[in-house]
Amino acid sequence: MCGIVGVVSRTPVNQLLYDGLMLLQHRGQDAAGIVTSEGNVFHMYKSSGYVRDVFRTRNMRELTGTAGIGHCRYPTAGSAYSDLESQPFYVNAPFGITLGHNGNLTNSEALKRELFQLDFRHVNTNSDSEVLLNVLALELERAAQHHRLDPDAIFRAVAGVHRRCRGAYAIVAMIAGCGLLAFRDPYGIRPLVVGRSETPAGPEYMVASESVAVEACGFAVLRDVAPGEAIFVDFAGRMHARACAESVRHTPCIFEYVYLARPDSVIDGASVYESRIHMGAELARRIHAMPEAGDIDVVIPIPDSSRPSAMQLANDLALTYREGFVKSRYVGRTFIMPGQAMRKKSVRQKLNPIGMEFAGKVVLLVDDSIVRGTTSREIVQMARDAGARKVYFASASPPVRYPNVYGIDMPTQKELVAHGRSEAEVAREIGADLLIYQGLDALKAAVRAANPRLTEFEASCFDGRYVTGDVTADYLAQLAGDRPAGRGEPQREDDRVVAGD
């Protein structure tokens, strides 16, 4: 999961790109990069770390120009991190192209071999994003008429990318001397929105992973980029759009609504906050039918993104809602720490219970998800140590039983606490007296309630159905074998890594 942003402005663009990345920081915290365009010259700076730490005043002064793209990176499953893989990537042939990618290609190894053996293009890193950049460069070369690019040629090139690439990808790219290009895979798995701002000098355009970045930077959201669609904004500020895929199927990633996206974003016409409210309502219906519902004294969320669900659940069940945990935002992220002892220590430092909310009570803890189970176990034990008489645990999403291959870093299947276990067995694993999972149909209904036009979702981590149709058992086994040691938790909204493990 990564954050991407692209802008064509009438004034220097470096501050806009920086602000956009700050608003998307929750989507990736391992590295950040910005490229600006000044005439036919690109200016680039990227490094590992948070956006606020990567860019200094001296770096920003060198990022001159009125158009540019930015990227904040979190490595996906199977990718080892190195500074070389910070984005955006750049190639100088045939036209000079720089690119940022959110998602994950499922056929990147086959494409890499084709590029080297048949197309004589060299890929220098293990990143599937560099593979995608080289495919785009090759397709632009083939589509160009007399080595000149116009919107028709660019859209033909994107159609070529769609024919060759499989998996999930939301892309921002700049072509030297031409303009800003953005496109989305034919399934619309990863999000991408486009906005416009009217200025006395003419319109400005911005594309970003989430609507919050567009709106907070002063742009009005025009719409989501459609599955298989490409948006091209030339450096004169003219926007062109075209459907470039032969067939499309709109299946946005349902994990975005569960916890990846910020609650103030709207993705594919569905408010993330409203979706989480409906998740709480759906969970309340399930709990209401259980005999244990009458035992619950208090509903407590695991900070932060489970709050809307927990509040709605408590309201619908006429239960007391309380904030029972205080979270420190200044402790290292648990999911990159080697060893369970370090992970447990960090969880204890990051969350601290308020004893009076637990003492002698039957507590219902509400989280957005349970992935590995390690943090859930620690939180349940914290509640018991604080004096809870019983601890019930509710997940606003279904059991995570399968790996994600479309751009979310997750444990291998054998590391998922729900894999091969019943609900009661998972409850024992995390130490809860009772565990309640959301049903998958209920989760889909919750998001659909926020936008009834959404009919399908990418929900493979829950049901094992990979919408692109090319994910095999061998591929998953290879992905598990390639997985770098020490990774194991998905990046979280608002740096809320402790919730949901």
Image (cartoon, rainbow, N blue to C red):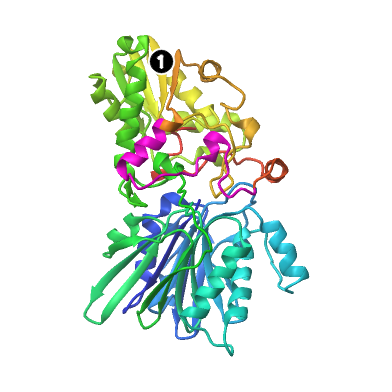
Q: Residue furthest right?
A: 117
Q: How many marks?
A: 1
Q: Position of residue 130 (x, y in %)?
A: 62, 65
Q: Residue furthest bottom?
A: 146
Q: Quadrant of residue 297?
A: top left
Q: Position of residue 245 (x, y in %)?
A: 52, 64
Is residue 495 visible to us here?
no
Residue 203 appears left or right of 499: left
Q: Is residue 465 magenta?
A: yes
Q: Quadrant of residue 296?
A: top left
Is residue 127 visible to us here?
yes
Name the residue nearer the viewer: 349 or 445: 445
Residue 495's place in the image compared with 417, above or below, is below
Q: Position of residue 332 (x, y in %)?
A: 48, 41
Q: Residues within 10 Å of mark 1 (few under 14, many from 20)?
A: many
The residue positioned 23% from the left and 25% from the top of the image is 315
| SS class, disc 1 | strand
Residue 17's place in the image compared with 311, above or below, is below
Residue 74 appears left or right of 134: left
As shown in the figure, which amino acid type bears the numbered disc 1?
A: Val
Which residue is the site of mark 1?
391
Q: Is residue 394 magenta?
A: no
Which contiguous range is marked in magenta? 442-470
Residue 144 appears left or right of 228: right
Name the residue nearer the viewer: 137 or 159: 159
Name the residue nearer the viewer: 32 or 441: 441
Q: Position of residue 400 (x, y in %)?
A: 53, 32
The residue positioned 42% from the left and 58% from the top of the image is 192
Name the residue nearer the viewer: 43 or 118: 118
The residue positioned 61% from the left and 61% from the top of the image is 165
